[in-house]
């Protein structure tokens, strides 16, 4: 799947919804055909991730566990070479939404490889206290504010302060704060279905052990017919948008009140895809022969958190 296209670099744009990533790695880029380019990391992590995607999306692959796993990953479109660098070309899961809100959740209580020393483990535990208790850590999230017609970014500094399951629940509620109650309940219902499908796969698969990978959640915040917005900046803490309907800037959605939705009936909401959840960051995926309990522990607690939020909204 190797390819080379240096002319492509002139038409790349910065990916506007990135909320996490390695400081030593280039920011994600968006291609003209709407895919995301992720720079291949230094060896051995980078090559490990390339081999993982090449294996899972091999057209000759027939193993049922692998074929099922494809559904939970961004679609892989091969390797692109630009300016002497190599990039994974991946599906952009936010393109289906007009106003995507995004959250990056790292899965697993253990997020290091077997050969690291004890001091490294202790530093990680102190840095991310929620991960030690819940088996997952929220790395960052992006919420659309209908009052200001702009995105609010909650990054690493905010998320490292989260320490309890109650903190996680409040943060998930903040993440869902861009839409009304009815919309939120439909999103949570769809999200639970997707997360449960991933959980069922992990309960039965014996092929891989996922270390320090994430689940990227993206949902649709455009619950108004006449919201039209244009992205203008991706470098600030809050990424600015220009709202064409200024009447929407006078009020922010109250999560306890369902606004009038002229073009979206209840049945349309049921039939519409409002949220997506995919496994990303697979540079630390290793072959295995037993159950990945470390991953399952974190994923089960995420599902439990979403169920508690769903109960509160009901």
Image (cartoon, rainbow, N blue to C red):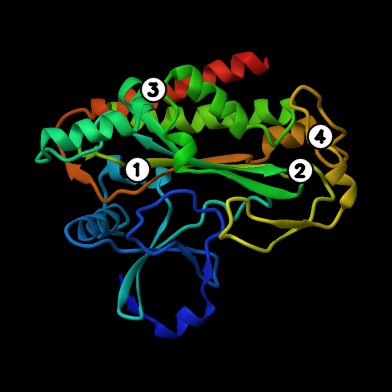
Q: Quadrant of residue 215?
A: top left
The label number, if any, that marks residue 6 in the structure image? none
Q: Are marks 1 and 2 in contact (CB under 8 Å)?
A: no
Q: Which sits earlier in the primary sequence, circle 3 or circle 1? A: 1
Nearer mark to the viewer, of 3 and 4: 3
Which residue is disc 1 drawn over? Answer: 69
Q: Is residue 186 visible?
A: yes
Nearer mark to the viewer, of 3 and 1: 3
Which residue is disc 2 drawn over? Answer: 146
Tell me the CA gap for discs 4 and 1.
33 Å
Q: Are marks 4 and 1 in contact (CB under 8 Å)?
A: no
Residue drawn at (17%, 58%) of the image: 44
Which residue is disc 4 drawn over? Answer: 265
Q: Please provide percent x and percent y for residue 193.
A: 51, 29
| Mark 4 crowdedness (10 Å alpha carbons): few <14, some 14-19, many ≥20 | few
Q: Which sits earlier in the primary sequence, circle 3 or circle 4? A: 4
Q: Please provide percent x and percent y for residue 163.
A: 41, 23
Q: Secondary structure at mark 2?
A: loop
């Amino acid at each position: 799947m190797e390819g080379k296209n240096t002319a492509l670099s002139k038409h790349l744009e910065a990916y506007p919804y990135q909320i996490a990533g390695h400081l030593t790695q280039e920011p994600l880029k968006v291609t003209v055909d709407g895919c995301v380019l992720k720079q291949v990391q230094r060896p051995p992590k980078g090559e490990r991730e390339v081999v993982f995607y090449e294996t899972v999306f091999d057209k000759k692959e027939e193993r049922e566990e692998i074929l099922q796993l494809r559904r939970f990953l961004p679609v892989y479109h091969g390797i692109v070479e630009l300016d002497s660098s190599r990039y994974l070309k991946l599906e952009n899961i936010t393109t289906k939404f007009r106003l995507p809100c995004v959250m990056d959740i790292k899965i697993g209580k253990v997020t290091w490889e077997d050969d690291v020393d004890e001091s490294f483990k202790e530093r990680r535990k102190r840095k991310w206290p929620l991960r030690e208790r819940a088996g997952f850590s929220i790395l960052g999230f992006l919420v659309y504010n209908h009052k200001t017609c702009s995105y609010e970014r909650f990054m690493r500094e905010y998320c490292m302060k989260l320490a309890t399951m109650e903190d996680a629940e409040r943060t998930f509620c903040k993440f869902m704060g861009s839409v009304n109650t009815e919309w939120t309940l439909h999103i949570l219902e769809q999200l639970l279905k997707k997360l449960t499908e991933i959980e069922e796969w992990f309960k039965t698969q014996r092929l891989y052990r996922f270390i320090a990978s994430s689940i990227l959640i993206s949902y649709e915040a455009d619950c108004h017919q006449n919201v039209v917005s244009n992205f203008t900046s991706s470098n600030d803490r809050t990424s600015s948008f220009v709202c064409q309907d200024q009447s929407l800037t006078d009020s922010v959605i109250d999560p306890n009140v369902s606004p009038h939705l002229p073009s979206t009936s209840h049945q349309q909401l049921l039939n519409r895809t409002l949220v997506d959840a995919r496994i990303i960051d697979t540079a630390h995926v290793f072959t295995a022969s037993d159950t990945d309990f470390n991953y399952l522990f974190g994923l089960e607690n995420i599902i439990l958190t979403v169920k508690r939020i769903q109960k509160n909204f009901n």
